[in-house]
Image (spheres, helix red, strand yellow):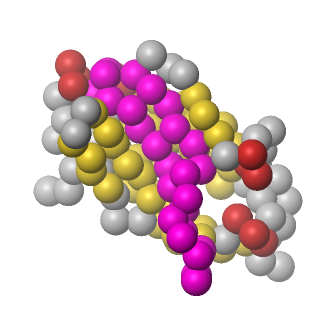
Amino acid sequence: QRQLVESGGGLVQPGGSLRLSCKAPRMILSSYVITTMGWYRQAPGKQRELVANITGGGTVNYVDSVKGRFTISRDNGKRTVYLQMNSLKPEDTAVYYCKSNRGAIDYWGQGTQVTVSS
């Protein structure tokens, strides 16, 4: 069983919305609440970049290009982090990856494709 399981990608028109979810089914709650969760994306021919992350304490960080459009949140009881993406643009098209970080331990999800196109 994978450490992180992502869902919610798909095809959407410009201006539309999607919500990505990432669940950590194997992580115990006491570890999850101190784990920083993040979303990264990689477009064809480009390097993987951080989109947003959220610490166990709820501090959030966004790349400038998504500020005001994307919202990251977490539900510790469900061991799940979300990325609400609004006002999507074609340049948001990428494979989106979930990542967990706790000290020196990182896990990555398998990735979910987001395509913004008319």
Query: Can see residue 38?
Result: yes
Most foreground residue, 58 or 50:
50
| Count of numbered badges drawn on the protein | 0
Q: Quadrant of the N terminus?
A: bottom left
Left or right, 111 with reference to 15: left
Most foreground residue, 26 or 104:
104
User: At x 39% / y 32%, what residue is drawn?
Assistant: 36
Using the image, determine if residue 33 lies above or below residue 8.
above
Q: Position of residue 98 (x, y in %)?
A: 42, 52
Left or right, 114 with reference to 2: right
User: At x 67% / y 71%, what residue is drawn?
Assistant: 93
Magenta span includes 46: yes
Left or right, 10 with reference to 102: right
Please identify the quarter of the rendering in which residue 62 is found.
Answer: top right
Residue at the limit of the structure toward the bottom, as seen here: 45
Most foreground residue, 4 or 8:
4
Please identify the quarter of the rendering in which residue 110 is found.
Answer: bottom left
Q: Position of residue 33 (x, y in %)?
A: 32, 21
Using the image, determine if residue 84 lies above or below residue 92.
above
- Residue range (magenta): 32-56
Using the image, determine if residue 36 lies above or below residue 59.
below
